[in-house]
Image (cartoon, rainbow, N blue to C red):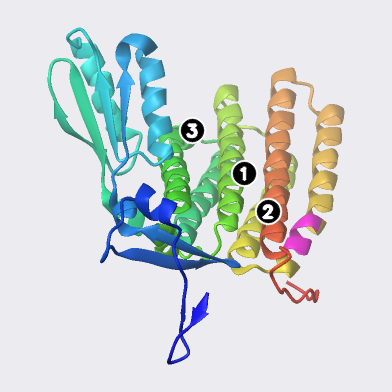
Amino acid sequence: MQAIKGGSYTITLPRWWVLKQRLRKGSKLFMSEDGAALKIVARDVIGKRRRVEIDLDKLGNMRSVRYAIWTYYMQGADEIVVRSSEPLAADRKRQLREVRMDLPGIDIAREDDRTVVFIVSEQQEEKKLDDMITSLHNVALTIHRDAVKALVEGNVEAAAEVVSREPEVLRIYRSIIRHIAQCSMNPETAYRSGVSNTRELLTYAVFARDLSRLIYHAMYVARHFNRYGRKIEDTDMLRLIEMLSEQVYRMQSLAVESFLEKNFNKVLHVTDMMVEVKGLEESINVRTLQSVSDVDKAVTLMMIVREMRRMAGHCVAIADIAANRMLAPDEEIMLVRTNV
């Protein structure tokens, strides 16, 4: 590094890197601060679209093909080509078209009798990661609330509707993982997404995974009740389940806030609340074993309570992720505990 007039500095780029990136005089570079590092990327590389091909003959069944498309999408591919050596049957074409329902921003650019080409809209890159996380969080809270409401009101149809929302959750989750992958490959996308240190992308990925698992268990609250298929006539038991639900609902809100706000006090509060959750779970299970003679009803109640305790466990995991995000060696966080 050399100093020049005006207080600025210059650095020399390695010849091997310039040749590898095919740069020349006047080529534009993008620079961004990444923690303690400075990233330099050629804009031609940033703008290059990522294209992949899937050989349908090698994968064989359509389930594997659709799974491969989902995976390439989440890895950040911009164009996904599905090829077959034989003309595609109408049913296979239909299943490929249905992929558009699974993945936000994807569409079919062109197709013929042996090929289908998917492209992904660049608009996906404009989103903030925190906004996407908040969207998934709000969906999780809504599913939790509606599942418990259906249980308390004895509304089996409403419980079935909650279970039917799984595709919506998967769409949001896949778009988040794709965006994290894009941020890891493109510092300009990371900058626009509010990520100033790519180390944080790992915490975002783990956070999204735990939040999606939390939603999975919330859906199973509705699924267990839907399987039982009739109103649970036990006001006191339902009241205890509502108390447990309120505790878990509050834990999730605090856990997500602790991550987004980098609030260590809320991390500690979430971990403290787990004690009460375990106590409520034990009380409900003991009461169930002592007072419920209907085996199917008893099993349903205990499984619902187990799902809620697992939801609380994922809240603690999210709080742990928040703590790891904010207590990195290069971060300065004031660890003063106050009431939340």
Q: To which quarter of the image does residue 186 belong?
A: bottom left
Provide the residue designation for mark 3.
Answer: 163
**Residue 321 tag number:** 2
Can you say whether 113 is above or below 151 in the image?
A: above
Residue 60 visible, this angle:
no
Badge 1 vs badge 2, beta-carbon distance below 8 Å: yes
Residue shown at the point (74%, 58%) measured from the top left: 270
Q: What's drawn in magenta, residue-wise?
A: 267-271
Mark 1 / mark 2, whichever is N-terminal: 1
Q: Residues within 10 Å of mark 1 (few under 14, many from 20)?
A: many
- Tell me, yes or no, whether the highlighted magenta stretch contains residue 269: yes
The quarter of the picture where the C terminus appears is bottom right
Residue at image location 28% in from the left, 20% down from the top: 95
**Residue carrying label 1:** 210
Which SS class for mark 3?
A: helix
Nearest to N terminus: mark 1 or mark 3 = 3
Question: With respect to residue 323, does 22 lie above or below?
Answer: above
Residue 127 picture location, percent across and down: 38, 58
Front residue (pair 107, 201): 201
Residues at marks 1 and 2, CA–CA distance in whole angstroms:
10 Å
| Mark 1: amino acid | Asp
Q: What is the residue that sits farthest to the bottom in this orientation?
A: 6
